[in-house]
């Protein structure tokens, strides 16, 4: 501010103040996920994940390049059974979400998402299992789709969408 006042007093315009850089963090908008498998590419393409907190609690919205939009509300951590662990091929502690709107399965309505992202850093794998018929371990619960992504910073700038 003192520099701006001094240059204005001398009849010169103050240099422009640089804008604040956009926030960059674990859940900020510059993170998107690119497909790590051909099945994921065909089903959704790249996805952007928006985190929010509403009256129903914390949620994530997956916005897919291929048109799918799914909002899921966090229920909490779960312990995977052997079938789900094998489907996700992950050993991290996954989080369970209830689907509030949208669908990731082709033939049935998914009711839950199991989100497994061992490390929230660039280049790491995200595995999302969509379940129909109930939460993991409930009678009738089946995995209808497993999607795998790679976490990428600034992928929008590279034209991924």
Image (cartoon, helix red, strand yellow):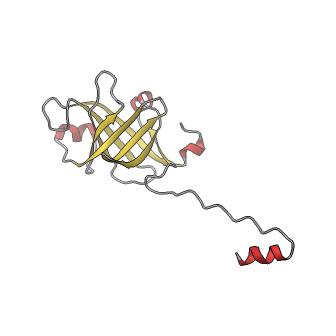
Residue depicted at x 43% and y 27%? 42
Task: Measuring from the top left, give residue 54's x and y in whole percent.
Answer: 36, 47
Query: Farthest residue toward the right?
Result: 11
For image coordinates 74% across by 64% down, the residue present is 16
Quarter occupied by residue 130: top left
> What percent of the width, then of the height, locates residue 14?
78, 69
Quadrant of the image occupied by residue 134: top left
Report the number of discs: 0
Q: Is residue 26 above or below residue 42?
A: below
10 vs 42, nearest the viewer: 10
Viewport quadrant of the N terminus: bottom right
In this view, the residue in front, 116 or 107, is 107
Residue 55's place in the image compared with 65, above or below, is below
Which residue is outermost to the front? Answer: 55
Q: Position of residue 88 (x, y in %)?
A: 28, 40
- Counting from the top left corner in percent of width and height, residue 149 is at 41, 40
Image quadrant assignment for residue 106: top left
**In the picture provided, is 82 more to the left or to the right than 11?**
left
Horizontal side of 96 relative to 12 (left or right) equals left
Q: Nearer the viewer, residue 83 or 10?
A: 10
Q: Image point 37% across, 44% down: which residue?
A: 60
- Residue at 47% x, 52% y is 28
Q: Where 48 falls versus 15 (above or below)? A: above
Farthest top residue in view: 107
Pick the front one: 118 or 27: 27
Asked whether, in this view, residue 105 is left or right of residue 84, the answer is right
């Amino acid at each position: 501010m003192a520099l701006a006042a001094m240059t204005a007093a001398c009849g010169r315009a103050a240099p422009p103040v640089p804008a604040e850089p956009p926030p960059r963090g674990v859940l900020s908008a510059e993170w998107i996920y690119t497909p790590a498998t051909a099945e994921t590419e065909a089903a959704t393409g790249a996805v952007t994940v928006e985190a929010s907190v509403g009256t129903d609690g914390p949620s994530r919205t997956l916005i897919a390049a291929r048109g799918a939009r799914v909002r899921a509300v966090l229920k909490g951590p779960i312990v995977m059974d052997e079938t789900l662990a094998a489907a996700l091929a992950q050993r991290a502690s996954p989080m369970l979400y209830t689907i509030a709107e949208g669908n990731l399965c082709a033939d049935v309505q998914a009711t839950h998402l199991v989100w497994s992202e061992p490390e929230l850093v660039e280049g790491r794998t995200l595995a999302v299992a969509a379940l129909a018929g109930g939460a993991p371990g409930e009678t009738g619960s089946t995995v209808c789709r497993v999607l795998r992504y790679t976490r990428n910073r600034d992928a929008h700038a590279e034209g991924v969408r």
